[in-house]
Amino acid sequence: MSAMDPTEIFRQEASELFEVLEGALLDLGQRPDDRELVDSAFRALHTIKGSGAMFGFDKVASFTHEFETAFDRVRKGEIKPTQELISVALAAKDYIRALIEDPQSTDDIIGEAILDDLKRFVSFDQPAAPAVQIAEAPPLVPGDSKQAGWHLYLEFESHVLRNGSNPLDLLEDLCKLGPCFVVPVTDGIPFLDEMEPEDCYLKWDVKLHAACDKDAIDDVFMFVQDEMKLTLAPLEQVEAPAPGPLFRLLDEEPAPTAETVVAVAEAAPAPVAEQPAAKAEPKTETAKAEAATEPKAEIKREAAPAKRDDVKQERGIATVRVQAERLDELMDRVGELVIAQARLTQLASSGSDLSIKMIAEEIERLASSLRDTTMGARMVPIGSLFGRFRRLVHDLSRDLSKPVEFVTTGEDTELDKTMIECLADPLVHLIRNAIDHGIEDNATRAANGKTEQGRIELAAVHSGAQVLVTVKDNGGGLNTARIRAKAEEQGLIAAGAVLTDHEIHQFLFHPGFSTAQTISALSGRGVGMDVVKRTIENMRGSIDLSTRPGQGTTVTLRLPLTLAIIEGLLIRVGEGRYIIPLPAVEECVELTAEDERSRGRNFLNVRGNLVPFLRLRDILSVDGSPDQHQKTIIISTGETQVGLVADQIIGNHQTVIKSLSKLHSDVTIFSGATILGDGTAALILDVAQLVALAQSKVEKHISEAA
Amino acid sequence: MALNPTEPKWSLRLPADCSIAAIRNVYELIREAFGRQERLEIDCSSVDKADVTSIQLLLSTAKTGEAQGRPVVLTSFSQSLRNTLRRAGFASDAMLDQHLPQKKDGT
């Protein structure tokens, strides 16, 4: 077991936090009044800041701190998060991500520019913030100074530092509320031998001379409220600072005198006035809350019970973070086990020992459930992928001035993690296409009586052993005539050839095919859909387009649940054995003597339908004479059916897919290989390629006949 | 406790990073140094990154030294360490002296 690099752990954690942050910011654009979103954004920021500092990402910590400070007015509810503000916040998030992932590529100037923007937006409505604030704030009653202030005792739980919180930052935040006198309490410091250097032992006794609200103090500690004991008591009056062990925090001059402290207290009225709902009588407030039995009462924190419940729930779900490659390794081992088990089963069935047969069956059952469990462990909800498209849609919608509503469903649908990784790029292409080509511009939409806001739906749903992912827009639909014209222009079809709409749409998947009139930064270069199709087919999936003129286009991706192990149909052609993926198999029929005779035609009559067939013996160049009773396996991809003629159908087989070596990368009709029970290898036939091959033969046949 | 100039002493220079990310190593260094020599002098001039854990470690070192009757002296606090101490409330030299035995320049 190798230990993970802590920096790498931080990067992973941060990347999850960035998703939370981005999601919250984007949602905030739609629901600016949702306090929970602001809080969740702040929690993510705060954790990034804390862990960043802990793992030595100082730039991240300091920038995030600035970001937090600038965004603070949003948190306080003083300003509404506007679209512009959210865009800047997203840019800031990107900058922090760059600082973590590739610090070399960033420049401090970018960070400063972002912060300037951020500051400009948050202070837009009040250029001279402090002056206005003071003017707006209710004038301080002269007598206020008598009971202004709080006496705090801070005691943190021992693990608080490991979680990335920094009590010194909290003290500093506290100082922003007003003049603060911080005394460290060192009683808890243990001897060296008893010490855990990362634990927190220091405690603090703080006198805060500011008539601020208790909520303002709670706000400072909101992120650590579950990890500390905060004792809060109102200060009766401004105490003359004792010359003893009371020292002002952040003072540049050490050992301040009583005069300087008082001067500071008087010279800093702004932070005092800044508290929007400064309670004139902090004492009565405490009396209400604490029944005023003791002068120092421990504050029971009930400020946000709902939020805390959430946290509890999150903690309740026990999850373990495992390196992805370990899961891959586990899957490999399970694959080997399945192969070994197949050999055992074969051996047992050839013998007559009943007990061996029973054990073989038992192991088969166990191996099969182990395979399912392992595959389950590799499953990741597709929602983790969907999240990142929200940003894409947000940015594209802004850049193209096409307001788009982005709806996702089925985020809980699970897919093998490798599939999720492979799926990201194709989906980016499809969503870009949907916004760039699918959704019409505002004028066209208005003319067609559509809502101004376009709609893109990204959905995932389980369907048998497959997952269907659909990208649906409510735009103008595909322009079949234009696709046809372009196909004719490129010489892909003869002018006037009779083709169904569906067939014409397939040209979109042709390499270099684009009907876009102008090449934009986003799409129109004709690279894209063919790459999408190839990627999906490499994942043993299929892609399908359907469109309704004026109403929109739906692209459906059908994907297998996993890439590692599939159910296959084992067949024999000559001496060799091959696997056909079972989901592609529709039925198996015998090749009749009549079909056998029609050598030239290569068409099979299946209940009245003509289905082209391929003789695998011919394709695989098998010598010798074929078996007497040839079998045909009807396979299909979507709507096209093709028959494959083999010598024998052996049965279904759990196929552990082994990829072919680079030497075989140009062999198109095989998608991989597997090891059979007797230790020999069998090749896996690539269904999509065989169907394409059959179709090209049919076309050749038709043109020859013509 | 008077310092005997003839007594063998061990000077330990703290590394630049004394923050929580590296504090475990610093802790081991100090414990090791404690085991070696009777008198320990800790040079804090290179400390560039410090936080609560650095302060706690120094406090504990001083406390342990005092309890065991073994002199521990801290020398030349770096600006960064001073700032951190000040942020934690150790705002004056008097306060520092109370908790951390320092050797002033020239003494």
Image (tube, coloured by chain):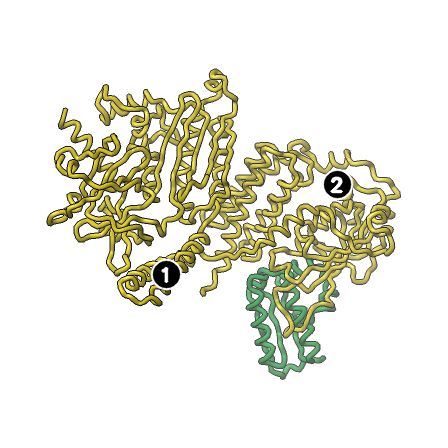
A241 w.r.t. B33: above or below: above
Instruction: Give the CA distance from mark 2 to mark 1.
Output: 76 Å
What residue did someone put label 2 on?
A274
Classed neighbour count for the residue bearing mark 1: other residues with Cα under 10 Å, few (<14), some (14–19), many (≥20) = some
Residue at 44 percent of width and 23 percent of height: A551
Position of residue A320 in the picture relative to residue A299 (left or right):
left
Could you tell me which residue is drawn at 56 percent across and 43 percent down? A21
Say which of A442 and B91 sits in front: A442
Residue A449 percent location from the top left of the image:
50, 17
Instruction: Note whether residue B73 is visible.
Output: no
Is A280 above or below relative to B56? above
In-front residue for pair A165/A334: A334
- Residue found at the far right of this picture: A143
Q: Badges 2 and 1: C-beta atoms under 8 Å apart?
A: no
- Residue A661 position, x and y percent, is 26, 53
User: Which chain is in yellow here?
Assistant: A
Pair 2/1: label in front: 1
Q: Quadrant of the C terminus of chain A?
A: top left
Amino acid type, mark 2: Glu
Residue A494, position as x, y percentages in the image: 21, 23
Above or below, comparing residue B77 to residue A692 in the picture: below
Chain that is green in the image: B
Give the SS element for disc 1: helix
State the mark number for residue A361. 1
Foreground: A310 or A362? A362
Give whichever of A350, A320 is nearer the camera: A350
A700 to A418, vertically: above or below = above
Name the amino acid, label 1: Glu
x, y percent for residue A238: 85, 51
